[in-house]
Each structure stands twice: as structure tokens, then as C-alpha cells.
Image (cartoon, rainbow, N blue to C red):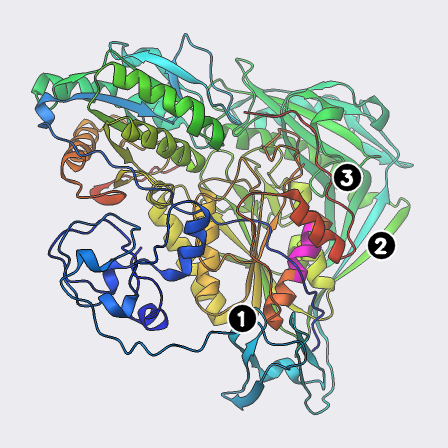
Amino acid sequence: MRLTTISGLQSEIFVPVTPRPVFTELKKPLSECKVAFITAGGIHKKSQTPFNTSGDFSYRTIEFDTPSSELMVTHGGFDNSDINKDVNAMFPIDRLHELVEEGFIGSLSKETYTFMGGGGNVEKFKNETGPEIARKLKEQGVDIVLCTGGCGTCHRSATIVTRCCEAEGMSCVVIAALPPIARQQGAPRITAPHVPIGSNAGEPNNIPMQTAIIKESLEWVKDCPSYNQTKVLPYEYRHNV
Amino acid sequence: MSITKETLQMHLKDPAIFCCRRQKGLVISEADLEDPALFEDMIEAGLLELSSDGLRIEQVLGSTLTANVEALTPITREVLDKVNDIDEKPEKPEETCIKEKERPTTKTGRGNNMIHIEIGKAKNLEQFSLDIPIAAFEHGDTIKCEEPCGGEIETKKKEAPKTKRVFNTLKKQHIRINEVEIGSETSIKDGRITIDSAITKRAVKEDPLCKSIELDVIYPDKRHVYTDTIMDVCPIATKVEGELGHGVTKVAEGVVFMLTGVDEDGVQIHEFGSSEGYLDEKMYFGHPGCADEKDIIIRCHVVIERLSGMTRPGPFAAHKCQDYIIQAIRDELKKYDGEVIREEICEDVRRPGNPRVVLVKEIMGQGAMHDNVICPTEPCGILGGQKNVDCGNVPIMLTPNQVRDGSIHALTCIGPATKEMTRHYIREPLVEGLAADEEMDLIGVIFVGSPQVNDEKLWVSERLGSLLESLDVDGCIITTEGFGNNHIDFIQHIEQAGKRGIPVVGVSFCAYQGQLVVGNKYATAMVEENMDKGGFENNIAGCSCVTKEVATRAIAMLKNKMSGVEILPAPKKWNNDVINANNKLLGLKETELVESGTLH
């Protein structure tokens, strides 16, 4: 059979290249570190303007003493029911306070910043939102930044902002439900629990699992030998939608 | 990314570059080196700078590092204990293109029922080889492989009778509808659909999550009306003979249902963006998933329980209750002997001897609205179907006729512009294009869900790979709707085909906002669906999806790939000029972008 062919056709979609390495070695014990947690998963205070679910490069300021009951999610990229049950499934604020009490980490920053990374505008996150969040965290003396993605493009936005923080001299890890994206987009360090998007920080209301994911991610910040390395975490949760 | 021993052998004379940071004392092996095939991209992206002091791979293997070296840094003498002595006799400079007069040296041979074609060297084409099953030449046809230097390979085989085998015939009767009204009984008479106004009270009882339903009729000249977010566009079609995919189906022509919805708090039932606003501005009329310019729209507006919009049961309740209403009209349509304005004969055919191709449609499977009902009893219906999420998102094969007979009811998700609504599938341009193409043998359409867990994405993709292998296809086109996490499995599907040597074309919305988050070396023939000026998900329902033009470009690329005709690599940024250059080559109209002003 003769196939009609046409010379000169060009592929229309490019494949991404992993960007330049960025890596800040952690030089303090975890118990002396000031930690911040950022998320691209669309978490905000109930009193704040919700995110635009089809793309939004703005961010919200969350004081770390905000009760978790005052937080909610606005995100279109995944089933929200897990976060509706327990916001710690994406933004484990209660677990972080417990880790400070336990002495596992030194302290938390006064405030942190959250965004909705779904469909995130790459240039805006790279050149505006990311550097601004990084600067504000650095000004508070933050040593370690933990970050959860959310959906697919959230992982891209999460990684871009995390890279900005790393470049400002903080040591960061992306807790990734979709590790291939965090890797390709150039996350400095990656931990990968076996969780669905929408419960990136562990099963809702499963306190031991959420604590273990954060602790092992913090340890990976300390132990990760070089840029863009992934540690698979042995925690599995399936969300039966 | 390190390289394998196999890759190493191909690149001994290429620059030696560390893939990752390496520490003093390391004995260098292939595991430490970056793949030279990526250098061009990396240089372009500013990640890599080659140095004239840099050593070649063959010079550094087995040497020990005397200092720490960062990733993507050329390896030089200064950091090594020794440099392998390689016979340095000057190499003949490599020709990059054969001269105009020169013909590429080609050889063809047969073995294992394959025809093997190998081209020693041609412009922009080196060490090219192609294996084509002998079955592809059974009818005395000619396969012609064009390439930029004008080389041509013609293989003739003995004459054999061409037999087209028809499996299923489906007759779609399009029945004219001129008028729709809400009245006191449900009926169809003289081209007029009347819907009993009380039906909404019965429909609402179909699901406890559904709180209220309103129906109204929007004529084409009255579209400047406010609408809540458009969840779906659904045709009215019904079986009058046979089952999905064969027999006779009646389709109401000139009218469609449009499902809109909010929850009890007034929150739009939407996921990745919503399309509430003036209807005339919020739908791309005429696109496959949308209402056509002259269609009457029956709007079914549903209110569901608060906070159930982003969970799986909530939006499904809205679809289910609407389907109750549509079924009442289907029952009338079955009895109605109105004017048939168009009769479409669809055939499931096998064209032995033509390249066997399959269309793979990745559909959403992450839950909430990321779900679809497959093979309901009635075309585009709900009842009797199974949801792909419940089926574990595994690949499911349908015949082209089944797809064209409304086997997919989309519980539509993701962004309005990039989702494929129920109407899309009953007239999918790629299904139509491949089924009608007499050069191809479309063996089926595979639907594969996109799960929300990374491990499951890979698992599902591997199942697809095995299926493609056992179907022994000569080529495939893989599409996806939306963008983001589903691109992980989409790209993985492309790899599953590519690594088995199956020519593959990918089709997706990517542009600016949806640019691929992952990639691999097999994604070299890719077709863009975007029609937004800024390259964004612009919340105009059905704007950036598979159109006839997208389908034509994809099919042309597949034929090129199957014939070994080069497809030029994509530029490193989305550029609509590339798309229009392809359109021009294929005699298609320009892809005109919509100025939506979207910038988020």
C-alpha cells in the first residue's frame, strides 16, 4: 500500500529539558533548623479569596499559628474529598507543630505562603512569585523548605518555587506524588511516598503516616548527596474515589 | 541521566560529560556520563557548555577522578589520574549531507516475513532502517518513502486481490428537529420536541445528591444569555435496531442538551476552570464537542448538594438526572417518523494489506469529574455503562463504530477548553479520519484512563504497551485531553509504543500553559490542539481539542513516520507558526487563535 507522505512537516510540541542544577547543602542539625512548609495544592484560609482554579500565580500568606480548622482548599486538578476531611493531607500544619514540640526540628517560620500551582504560568512563577516567596522565607531566617505539589502542573509550579528557595540558600525538598515531574522540572531533592494527588502529604487523619512522611523528608534534606535525587518512601495510601 | 553500555558504544567519540556531581576517587564508567544525544538540547537551554579541553568518552573510561566535579561539566585532563591513549589518527571529516546528485545507498531484503529497508546515508538521515511486514505489500502496491534529498524506495510485489472485510454496519439517521418547547407532555411531532415541564420533578429523584433541575430552551439567535459552567454537551440519539456499533441509530439533528450546574452554595461544578458567563462567548460553536452554529440548545441546569462538586458522586448525579430526561425524549424519537435529512453509513472494516493502526485515547480517570461512562445501553447515555475509574483505568478496546455510536458519555472534567465532551466522541475527527482513510487499516480505538497515582499511571501504561505489542500494530496515534499529571502517562504511552519500534504520534493541548511536564526521546511527532492566543486554558468550552485539522495533521505525521519520512524536531518554545506551516503543507485552513485575554 502506498502511503501518502509529505516532506517538511515539523513536530509541534517540545519536550522539556531538566534545568540547571541548584543545591544548598544543609549545615545544621535538624533540631536547630527553622522550617517552613509551602504548598502548590491550593490551600488557603477560609477568610481569604479562593484561587482561580484554571491558573493563578498569586499566593496567600498563612501564619503558622493558624488553626488547621480555618484552612480549606480551592483546587480543580483533583478530587478534594481527602483535604476536605483533613487539610494535613496536603498541608500538614498540625504535624509540624508536633515536630517542634518533640524537638525534631527547631522552630517554624512565623508565616508561610501557599499557592495553587495547577496550570501555573511558568514565567510568572519563575520570575515573580517564586523569587518573592523565597525572599520572604529567607528574611524570616528559614533553613529548610518542605513543599507539596498537588496536581501535575502543580508539581511543576511547586518545583519552580522550591528551586527559587534553594537558590536563596535554603535547603528544600519536594514531597512528590508525581516524582517524574519533580525530577524533570529540576527539584533539588525529592521524596516520593506512594500517595495519590490530593493527599500528597499522606492519608487524611492518619497521623503516624503524615508524621513519618515529614520526618523522612526532613532527613532526606540532611542526607541527600546531590541535586535532583529521589528517595522513595515506604508509605502507601490508595484513595478509593 | 546516566547511559547504558549500548548507548556508550554509539558515543565513544563524543564529549565526556558527567551526568551528576561526582566525587574525587570515582572510577569513571558509563553510569557516570550524560547521554550525548541530549547535548544539543542542553546547550540550547544554557545548561551545558562544551569546552575545547574536554575529553572524549573513550579517553576517560576507567580513569579515576582526582577532584570533585559538578554535573554537566566537561571532563578535562586536570581532574583525571590518566587519559586513555587512543589512536589519534585524523578522522575523515563526516559528511552531513550527500550531494544533490548522489542517491542514497539503499538495500532491501526479506526475512521473518518482514521487508527490511536500510538506507546507508542520506541527508539528515543516517543509518535509517525500516522493517515492514510483508503483509503490507500484498496487493502489488508501492510503498514510497520520500526523504529530503529526493531518495525514493519502491518495492513492488505480486498482484493479489484486495479484499475489504466489513464487520459491522451502522446506519445513523439524522432526523430534523426545528423547534423545541417546554410543555405539558413529552412528544415529538412535525419536527418539534415538546418536553413535559413536570419531568424535572421526576428526574430530580434519580439521585439524592441532586437538589433541583431546571430546563430551558436557547435558540441560536438568543445565545447572549448568562450560563453557569458548561458541564457537558450531549446529543439526543437512540438505538432503533441492534446494539451500539451496528444496526440503526436515530440522531436528533439541530438540537443538543447542555448540562450546567452549581452546588447549593452557588459554587460552579467545575474543576480546572469553569465556563460561566455569556453563552455566546463561552463555547466554541462548531467544534466537535460543542453545539453547532444552528443548534437549538436544551439547557438542563442542575443544583447538587453543597461541597459535593469536587467529589465523584456529585457531578455524576447531575449527569444521571439529565439522562433521565434525555431518555424520555429518546423514547419519543424511536417512534417518530420524521424527515431524515442525512443518512450516515459507518462501517467497521478491515483492509488487509494496509498498515494496521490503532487510535489510543487517554481519558481522565482521577475521580470526581475525571471519569467517563463506557458503553451505555443507549448512545451517549448513562445506564448500562461502566465507568473507566471502576474498571481500574485499564485499556479497553472499542470498534470505531462503537465510538461513532456514542459509546462514551464524558463526565467531563479538567479545563473547559481542553476537555472532550460527550458530543465529541460521537463525531471524533480522528476516528472519522482514520476509519475513512483507504491507505490505513484502523483496527480499533483503545480507551485508557489516567489514574491519579503515579505508580498506577505506569502500571496502566505497561498494560497498554503489552496490548499494542500483541495487536502487532504498525502505527498508532495517542491523544489525551487536558494537561498536567495526565501528561505523565501520555508520554509513558508514547514510550511504550516507541520502545517497541511502533511509529507513534502524540496529540495534546500543550502550548504555553500546558507545556509538557515530562518527556522522552520517542515524542518526536507531536500535534498541538491549542487555539488560544496566549496558549492558555481559556475557559471557552471545546476550544482547544481534536478538530478536523488536528486530526489531518496527526494522520499525515503518522504516515510520514511509518514511511520513514522525516518529521522536523519541534522548536524549544510553543509557536503557532509551526502549526500553520504544517497546515499549509497539508492544504488546511490556518489555525486562528482566539483572543481570550487569558493570562493566569
Amino acid type, residue under disc 1 in the picture: Thr
Specify the label residue B96 is tagged with: 1
Q: Nearer the viewer, residue A15 or A177?
A: A15
Sequence order check, earlier mark of 2 and 3:
3
Amino acid type, residue under disc 2 in the picture: Glu
Q: Which residues are magenta?
A: B550-556
Query: Residue A21 placed where, x, y %?
Result: 31, 41
Query: Residue B430 placed where, x, y %?
Result: 67, 55
Residue that label 3 marks? B286
Q: Whole-Å distance between the Cαs marked 3 and 1?
A: 47 Å
Q: What SS does tag 1 mark?
A: loop
Q: What SS does tag 3 mark?
A: loop
Amino acid type, residue under disc 3 in the picture: Gly
Q: Nearer the viewer, residue A131 or B558?
A: A131
Q: Residues within 10 Å of mark 1 (few under 14, many from 20)?
A: few
Sequence order check, earlier mark of 1 and 2:
1
- Residue B64 sits above or below residue B229 on the image: below
Query: Residue B517 placed where, x, y %?
Result: 44, 43
Give the letter of the chain under mark 3. B
Label the magenta part by its dominant secondary structure.
helix
- Residue B200 sits above or below residue A198 on the image: above
In this view, the residue farthest toward the top is A47
Residue, x 29% and y 34% (percent of image)? A174
Specify the label residue B343 is tagged with: 2
